[in-house]
Image (tube, grey):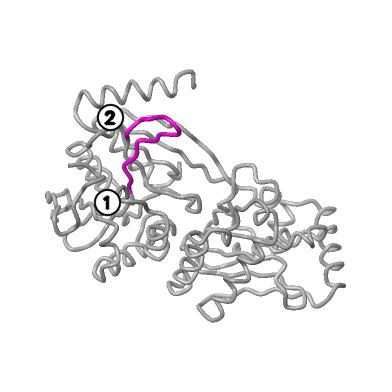
Amino acid sequence: MYLATAPSLSDFTKPFTGACGLEERLQVLDVATVDSAGLVDEWKALASRASEPNPFFEQWFASSSLEQFASGNDCKIATYWRGQSLVGLLPLVHSNDYYGHPLPHVSTWLHDNAFCGAPLVAKGCENGFWRALLRHLDAEPGPAMLLHLPGLPEHGPLNQALTSVLEETSRATSIVEREERAMLASDMSAEEYLAEAMSAKKRKELRRQRNRLAELGELTFERLEGTQGVEPWIEQFLTLEASGWKGDAGSALKADETTYAFFADTLCGAANAERLERLALRLNGKPIAMLANFLTLPGAYSFKTAFDEDYARFSPGLLLQLENLSLLNRPGVDWTDSCAVQGHSMIERIWREKRSFVSRNIAIGGPLRRFTARALMAYETRGRS
């Protein structure tokens, strides 16, 4: 038995007694079981006490993702329980495609619109979660040669706990990729931050662009939360995004029925979970720049943005990002992840902090398999300092 053919929740459990004295178990769930009422309730409760917020593995995001993008029986959900409480969760996939190379492995399941691979784990359960997951993969590795964990926040509690657990047994591991992206994290007010991040000349130019834009009609800014009006807002966003280069390239969310349904379901789910903040810059009521934030205190994620390219000379996307700096003034939000690619030319003009992510490989299975994995990792990272 291995991950790709693991049975459902009711069929598979491996209980053991952990350091806390409670019975602990790692259960691998079929995708078909994730909408059960009991699990959904536990999943929502787990998100509220996670040591590291990650909206992309919360129930409202992951369920829509699995429905639209999970293929066949390859995707599973690893759940970690203490007593009757769900205290850890990570979507996993068994794959033979490792960055274009035919290497069987187990990996965190992500897709192109999910931007963080940190599992949801309750505070204080980080080490126990990693031990339980590795124990399971050692016993049931199937054909997988290693565990691949992409998109882990490098300086977060989960990566730190993983490092500690790996050091306990001298288990082979390697960092195969590292990237960083813009983050907003400061004790300054929005006004103070902008003054530090951008020259007086550039700020003056943006004021001029805003004034010129306002000469074309009524220019308004909106910030919305809750569910009221969310469905027409979603349609406006998708239409706006598709009107630009993404529409021309066929990569707009609206261009494919699966990404269309995913985005609509996800934003509705986020609104119902009180996780969604919507920003829009409108000219005569028509949106010319829009932005969706996920609020996952103490963090936030700037998920998707779009602007009308017909007004590009007025920098509407940048003007909207100036309004988004108010996240610095929002109680409970300590940092915001831009979800932007490394080196993004627009957002890095404003957001000065960086959030670093690593992708890790870890040896699993018995001694021979671990020896082979160690050799593979040494080969892949050869020549690196």
User: Left or right: 331 with respect to 310?
Assistant: left
Q: Kindly indicate the quadrant of the structure image that contains residue 63.
A: bottom left
Residue 189 in view here: no
Left/right of residue 283 with respect to residue 83 in the rendered view: right
For the residue marked with disc 1, what is the amino acid?
Ala
Q: Nearer the viewer, residue 8 or 340?
A: 8
Position of residue 6 in the picture relative to residue 45 (left or right): left
Quarter-of-image position of residue 101: top left
Marks 1 and 2: which is nearer the front?
A: 1
Q: Please name the residue shown 30% across and 54% down the image.
A: 89
The image's mark for residue 242 is none
**Looking at the figure, which quarter contains the N terminus?**
top left
User: Residue at (70%, 46%) from the top-left corner?
Assistant: 345
Question: Tag 2 or tag 1, which sits nearer the N-term?
Answer: 1
SS for dot 2: loop
- Say if residue 157 shows up in the picture: yes
* Image x and y of residue 290, in percent: 65, 66
Residue 16 colored in magenta in the image:
no
Mark 1 sits on what residue? 78
Magenta range: 92-104
Look at 15% across and 59% down and name the residue there.
10
Please tell me how crowded label 2 is: few (under 14), some (14-19), or many (20+) other residues with Cα within 10 Å.
Answer: some
Determine the secondary structure under disc 1.
Answer: strand
Determine which residue is flagged by label 2. Answer: 171
Mark 1: give few (<14), some (14-19) or many (20+) Cα within 10 Å.
Answer: many
Q: Relative to residue 285, is residue 270 drawn left or right?
A: left
Q: Position of residue 343 (x, y in %)?
A: 64, 42
**In front: 125, or 314?**
314
Q: Magenta part mainly helix, strand or loop?
A: strand
